[in-house]
Image (cartoon, helix red, strand yellow):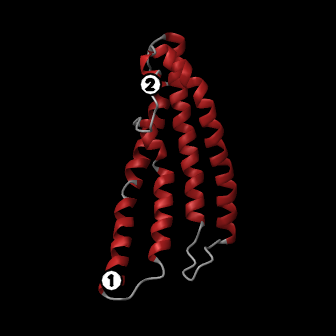
Amino acid sequence: MKSVLIAIDVLSDWTGKIFSFLILLITAVILFEIVARYIFGMPTIWAYEISLALYGIYVALIGAYSLVHGVHVNVDILYAQFSERTKAGVNLFSWLIFFLWCGALAWIGWIRGLESLMMGERESTAFACPTYPVKLSLAIGGTLLLLEGAAIYVRNLYTLITGRKIG
């Protein structure tokens, strides 16, 4: 079991590391638009849509990385005072809401993403950027969040039962 949990963590970690570099591409696209618009007086029709799509993909695919590294925002006023076992019990309850949300994100994401891919859906703008990469990234991101959430849930369950943490 421990090796499965570690494999999920490694997948989440590497997915986040790989897709974190999208921020550099987004920055380059925006910089290109600024130079084209304000220095050469030739704005593009594609930069805004591309940067928005890339940012959507970026946000969708680094969520599991944030989970594995524990950088999501927590409200710790009472929680910090709890023992590890009590924290695990509280987490088991609150993660049920997380699973409902991520399950819906993954389920609807796959349905809408595959529909979008099959029909070659595009934005209704002059540039007509494809929408299926963003929709599919939501499905993949939701699935990665579910996997990482399941790994954390198993760890909390183990801690609740045994009083010890698992790798």
Q: Amino acid at mark 1?
A: Tyr
Determine the CA span between mark 1 and mark 2: 48 Å
| Secondary structure of the residue carrying numbered label 2 | loop
Furthest-left residue in this view: 39
> Residue 11: in sight, yes or no?
no
CA neighbours of label 2 inside 10 A, class few (<14), some (14 to 19), many (20+) = few
Q: Residue at x 58, y 47 (%)?
A: 142
Question: Residue 120, percent across and down?
Answer: 65, 72
Looking at numbered disc 2 in the image, what kind of residue is underneath it? Ile
Determine whether 59 is above or below 131 in the image: above
The answer to which image quadrant residue 100 occupies is: top right
Q: Label 2: which residue?
A: 77
Q: Residue furthest front?
A: 77
Return the x and y of residue 87 as percentages of the image width and height: 49, 19
With respect to residue 82, does 130 lie above or below? below
Q: Which residue matches tag 1? A: 38
Q: Please, is residue 8 above or below residue 30 in the view?
A: above
Q: Is residue 63 above or below residue 159?
A: below
